[in-house]
Image: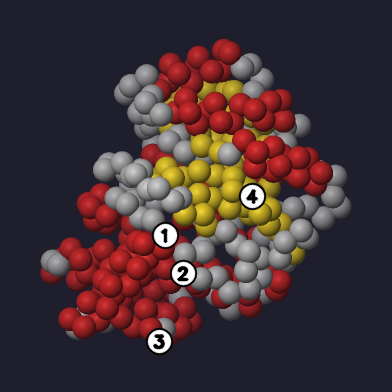
Amino acid sequence: MKILSIAIPSYNSQDYMRHCIESLLPGGEDVEILIVDDGSKDGTGQIADEYEAAYPGIVRALHQENGGHGEAVNTGLSHASGYYFKVVDSDDWVNPEAYEKILAFLKQTLNDEDPLDMLISNYVYEKQGAIHKKVIHYHSILPENCFFGWEDIGHFGPSQNILMHSVIYRRELLTGCGFRLPGHTFYVDNLFVFTPLPYVKRMYYLDVDFYRYFIGREDQSVNEKVMMSRIDQQIRVNKLMIDTYAAHEGAFSSPKLEEYMLHYLSTITLVTSVLLIKMKTDEAEVMRADVWKYLEENAPQAYRQMKHSTLGHLSSSRNKLSEKITRGGYKIAQKWIGFN
């Protein structure tokens, strides 16, 4: 059995995907690299086939009609055979030294009586033009050099959500909980992390700067103007996260798990709200009110807690002071998190 399956969702990625793939090849026979060509119209599919031919048994090229990032992840997962599963976007890459350490650690866990559900590591914002690269780590939040559960975690700050870049899941945990991402939707990386969390029991934090997250292209999905143009998809993801939270509300296995998932949901709802505020249209105001109404109707406990928090109160209100403060808070988040 392969230790790790790595899915690379790829759409019109010919200009940068080789860097991603080359960074993953040092995993050798311990990994399978699943390049999912999501209906690309450039040379992405040919490059995927080229690597499959050059590295049989390690690289697989999977071709499908365009279904979006989420459907590409679904395809990768459905074809994966590794014990663990990771997603690496085609414009990102991994650090070789950290990669070696992660594979060595995962290999040690294969025969554990209690399975490891989620491995967490650091990621680095490779922001174009930035001299100093921001590292997102979890030193003050997660125990180090030991396995732990939700009751052992600390308090997460605004810039310290566990993102897709920082997680490796046990594959059977994903398949066992019926995990599936929606097609033709951006921002599903949040769902990739968020949806399986209630099923995670045993975790480990490896303090290595593994994932390198490239950011800076004008057409990138986290560009603010692009996010506004796709606000319907941001709202869809936000509501699906509310659905996930609502399905477990009142029945979380741990108060710390509930606290963290509420923290994550609050962050996404704040981003949605601020984008809608900055659009400055009556339609956007209607959509913002609808998001908060959806939260109130489907996850009333979360609504009450978020509504009475400072950021929740500001992002759900409609007066000019609230809007000014909320926009200011988002600018701080941009600086902390590195949004384009």
SS state under label 3: loop
Q: Residues within 10 Å of mark 4 (few under 14, many from 20)?
A: some
Q: Nearer the viewer, residue 199 or 25?
A: 25
**Badge 2 or badge 4: first in the primary sequence:** 2
Cα distance, mark 3 to mark 4?
37 Å
What is the CA distance from the residue labelled 1 to the residue labelled 4? Answer: 19 Å
- Dot 3, crowdedness within 10 Å: few (<14), some or many (≥20)? few
Residue 30 shows in this picture: yes
Kindly report the distance in space between the C-alpha atoms of the residues bearing marks 3 and 2: 17 Å
Q: Residue 303's x, y, as percent?
A: 42, 80
The earlier-in-sequence mark between 3 and 4 is: 4
Which residue is most to the front? 131
Q: Which mark is residue 308?
A: 3
- Mark 2 touches mark 1? (CB < 8 Å): yes
Q: Nearer the viewer, residue 89 or 330?
A: 330
Give the amino acid at mark 3: His
Mark 2 is surrounded, within 10 Å at the Cα level, by few (under 14), some (14 to 19) or many (20 or more) other residues, namely some
Judge from the rendering whether residue 148 lies leftward or rightward of residue 255; answer left or right. Answer: right
| Residue 16, x across and y down, in percent | 41, 29
Q: Indicate which disc, 1 or 4, sits on the residue closer to the N terminus.
A: 4
Lower position in the chain sequence, tag 1 or tag 3:
3
Q: Which residue is mark 4?
A: 208
Residue highlighted by disc 2: 158
Q: Which residue is mark 1?
A: 337
**Coordinates of residue 102 in the picture (x, y in percent):** 69, 43
Query: Disc 1 and disc 3: Cα gap in Å?
Result: 24 Å
Query: Secondary structure beneath disc 2?
Result: loop
The correct choice, above or below, for 193 with respect to 258 in the image is above
Query: Could you tell me the amino acid type at mark 2?
Result: Pro
Judge whether 61 appears above or below 8 on screen.
above
